[in-house]
């Protein structure tokens, strides 16, 4: 991580509304936060996440899987685009694609993802729906360091959210996202300011 005089450079990848991105953009307005969003990338055009970046004056790029002849080519192009912004930390904030081996080789150990469930329960694309369907009484969100698996990486932070009797998928997911935005902003800031170490899957802040 960078010295105290230069904020950590964050590249954030999004696929949708970008409320988690917004939490980071808002946090970065405070110089004491220790990080700045230097670019926002997406796997699709015309999403609110990209518009949030535009409004904040942050450069954006889009790399759509379907524009490349293979998933590996897309992964290489995405990796190159992210590398061009020299990130200290890459944040997947509602990015609905699995990054591939080239990306992991370049940014493994310094890419985090936020997932709307308490890992290791309910990995994948539909964490809130799967939790509701299973009937758990508590679910939540998990911030983890990305590895080659699906939501399997070392856990940085988790936040619990109760499931209410009258929840549907949308109400539950929206309540999870409130906790998720705070978890993300708090912990990315800490990662930027004090650094972190991963030993035997245990993520610890260097403080
Ligand atoms: C968040 O809940 C995030 O955890 C989830 O998408 C939402 C994005 O919201 N990601 C996944 O489910 C990835 N497996 P946002 O676009 O408003 O930040």
Image (cartoon, helix red, strand yellow):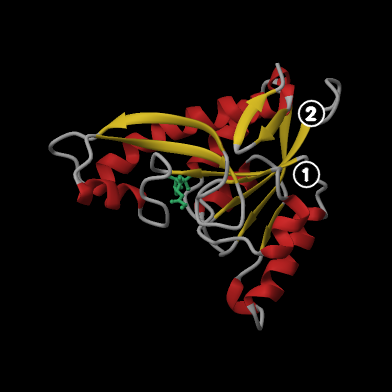
Relative to 202, say whether 102 is above or below: below
Asked if residue 168 is positioned above or below residue 161 in the image, the reply reads: below
Kindly state the secondary structure of the residue where label 1 is placed: loop
Picture residue at 28% right of the left edge, 46% below the top = 131
**Horizontal side, residue 105 vs residue 202: left or right:** right
Label 1 CA crowd tier, 10 Å (few <14, some 14–19, many 20+): many
Q: What percent of the width, then of the height, locates residue 137?
A: 22, 34
For this rendering, which residue is in front, 187 or 27? 187
The quadrant of the picture occupied by the C terminus is: top right
Which label sits on residue 31?
none
What label sits on residue 7 in the rendered view?
A: 2
Where does residue 193 sit, x and y in percent of width and height?
73, 23
Q: Quadrant where the N terminus lies?
A: top right
Residue at 65% x, 39% y is 56
Q: What residue would you read off at disc 1?
A: 87
Residue 172: percent from left, percent from top: 27, 40
């Amino acid at each position: 991580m960078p010295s105290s005089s230069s904020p950590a450079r964050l590249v954030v990848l999004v696929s949708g509304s970008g409320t988690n991105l917004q939490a980071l953009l808002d946090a970065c307005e405070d110089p004491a936060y220790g990080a700045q969003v230097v670019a926002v990338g997406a796997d699709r055009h015309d999403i609110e996440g990209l518009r949030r970046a535009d409004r904040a004056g942050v450069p954006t790029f889009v790399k759509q899987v379907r524009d490349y002849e293979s998933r590996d080519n897309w992964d290489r192009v995405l990796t190159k685009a992210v590398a061009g912004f020299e990130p200290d930390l890459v944040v997947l904030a509602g990015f609905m694609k699995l990054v591939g081996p080239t990306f992991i080789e370049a940014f493994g150990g310094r890419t985090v993802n936020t997932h709307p469930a308490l890992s290791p329960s309910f990995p994948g694309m539909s964490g809130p729906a799967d939790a509701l369907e299973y009937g758990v009484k508590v679910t939540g969100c998990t911030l983890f360091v990305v590895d080659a698996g699906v939501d399997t990486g070392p856990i940085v932070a988790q936040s619990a959210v109760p499931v209410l009797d009258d929840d549907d998928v949308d109400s539950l997911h929206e309540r999870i996202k409130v906790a998720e935005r705070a978890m993300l902003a708090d912990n990315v800031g800490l990662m930027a300011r004090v650094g972190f170490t991963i030993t035997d899957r245990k993520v610890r802040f260097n403080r």
